[in-house]
Image (spheres, grey):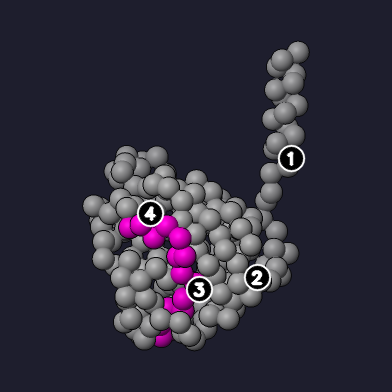
Amino acid sequence: MKKSILLVSFLALSCGKQTFSPSWLNEKAPDTFQARFETSKGNFEIGFERNLSPKAVDRVYQQIKHHFYDHTIFYRVVPNFVVQFGHMDSTKTANNWDKFKVEDEVVKGSNLKATISYARAGKNSRGNHLFINLKDNIKLDTVFYNQVKGFPTLGKVTKGMDVVEKLYGNYGNKTMKVYDSLAVNRKEFLKMFPELDSIHKVIILK
């Protein structure tokens, strides 16, 4: 009897689990909203402002709402520069979110300490990876990289910046030499960098 109950419960949970739906991409973010990041070092909150980068804030709203950043790793923490995180699980990106990149937008807000922006690799490449500035990185407002100018901010940490500053950063940029392996084998990646902190879950507050 117990086995039957467990099996039914497992099936119910499996059926209820959300898979990616392109319809999520039509969801529009509020003009402003707050999100709480629950991490291995404690909680911090970020306030997002749609007017700063409308298409990008819509995307981060969609991703947070549908738990995209839950259980992700702060895979790049460079003291006095940035904290970076995003989803390297190919099952969550390759066949869904990765197909729908965020179009480039002009920089309206400066990359000051505590602000958050999408990382990018070139034209219209924003979408899965975010970074929080650990200092005033004003050069990121105008830097010209791969034919695109600047990194538009989306909002800023409004509570718990001390938590962000405590995230393990002794590996620095060493993780970036092999970070592609995180998508292939998370366990092996963490064997190489066992002290990295992670996000348990992200919740929209208002």
Q: Amino acid at mark 4?
A: Val
| Category of crowding for the residue at label 3, using alpha-carbon neighbours closer than 10 angstroms: few (below 14), some (14–19), many (at least 20) | many
Q: Position of residue 158 (x, y in %)?
A: 47, 65
Pick whichever of labels 1 and 2 is earlier in the sequence: 1
Q: Nearer the viewer, mark 1 or mark 2?
A: 2
Density class for disc 1 (Cα within 10 Å; few <14, some 14-19, many ≥20) is few
Residue type at numbered disc 3: Leu
Tag 4, which secondary structure? helix
From the viewer's perspective, is the residue at label 1 or at label 4 nearer?
A: 4
Residue indicated by mark 4: 163
Q: Residues within 10 Å of mark 4 (few under 14, many from 20)?
A: some
Q: Mark 1 near mark 2, Cβ–Cβ under 8 Å? A: no
Q: Which residues are magenta?
A: 148-165
User: What residue is pinned by disc 2?
Assistant: 29
- The location of residue 195, given as percent across then percent down, is 31, 43
The amino acid beneath tag 1 is Cys
Left or right placement of residue 23 versus residue 127 in this view: right
Give the CA distance from mark 3 to mark 1.
34 Å
Residue behind mark 3: 154
| Residue 121 forms part of the magenta stretch | no
Q: Secondary structure at mark 1?
A: helix
Residue 90 visible to the viewer:
no
N-term mark: 3 or 1? 1
Q: Which residue is mark 1?
A: 15
19 vs 76, nearest the viewer = 76
Q: Nearer the viewer, mark 4 or mark 2?
A: 4
Label located before the other in sequence (1 or 4) = 1
Q: Nearer the viewer, mark 3 or mark 1?
A: 3
92 versus 146 height, above or below: above
